[in-house]
């Protein structure tokens, strides 16, 4: 009986391990400069059952930290992992245009390509790079 309990526990942990592992896109990402030349650091983390990203720091055109009313706001939400480094079915808010795009992301190493559309108008959000 004891062996069966241990075997079931080990099997359960082995099956749960992938679900408990962090998604490869989790972490802090530096955005591409916006229309004003500003950029930010986005913290991507789980927001069950999908992924969300919050602006944690804002920078001016020269790369100096700046105050922004958008720090603490969600920039990415409802992003679903689709496999092979692809994410979709989510939204990305672009503060420089105050528009929310139906978006997708493509992860390749420490680069994250962002794109999205709103009312048939699409925008390349550039490629973000991993900060940590």
Image: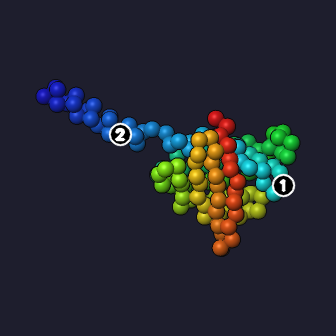
Image quadrant occupied by the N terminus: top left
Considering every residue shown, the one lying at the far bottom of the view is 119
Up-down relation of residue 131 to residue 98 (above or below)? above
Q: Position of residue 8 (x, y in %)?
A: 22, 34
Q: Indicate the secondary structure of the residue bearing disc 2.
A: helix
Q: Given the current orientation, which residue lies at the most extreme top position?
A: 2
Residue at 60% from the left image edge and 61% from the top image edge:
103
Residue drawn at x 59%, y 41% is 109
Q: Helix or strand or loop: what does disc 1 sit on? A: loop
From the viewer's perspective, tell me whether residue 45 is left or right of residue 118: left
Q: Residue at x 58, y 52 (%)?
A: 106
Q: CA distance from mark 2 to mark 1?
A: 45 Å
Residue 16 circle label: 2
Question: Circle 1 sits on which residue?
Answer: 36
Q: Please state the horizontal and vertical placement of residue 73, each as a whole percent of the image.
A: 68, 51
Q: Quadrant of residue 28?
A: top right
Q: Report the residue at 62% width, 41% height from top.
A: 110
């Amino acid at each position: 009986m004891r062996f069966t309990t241990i075997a079931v526990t080990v099997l359960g942990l082995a099956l749960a391990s992938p679900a408990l592992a962090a998604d490869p896109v989790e972490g802090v990402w530096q955005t591409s400069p916006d229309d004003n030349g500003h950029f930010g650091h986005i913290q991507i983390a789980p927001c069950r059952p999908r992924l969300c990203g919050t602006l944690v720091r804002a920078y001016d055109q020269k790369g100096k930290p700046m105050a922004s009313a958008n720090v603490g706001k969600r920039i990415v939400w409802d992003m679903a992992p689709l496999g092979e480094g692809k994410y979709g079915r989510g939204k990305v808010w672009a503060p420089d245009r105050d528009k929310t795009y139906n978006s997708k992301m493509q992860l390749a190493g420490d680069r994250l390509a962002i794109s999205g559309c709103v009312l048939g108008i699409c925008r390349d959000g550039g490629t973000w790079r991993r900060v940590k």
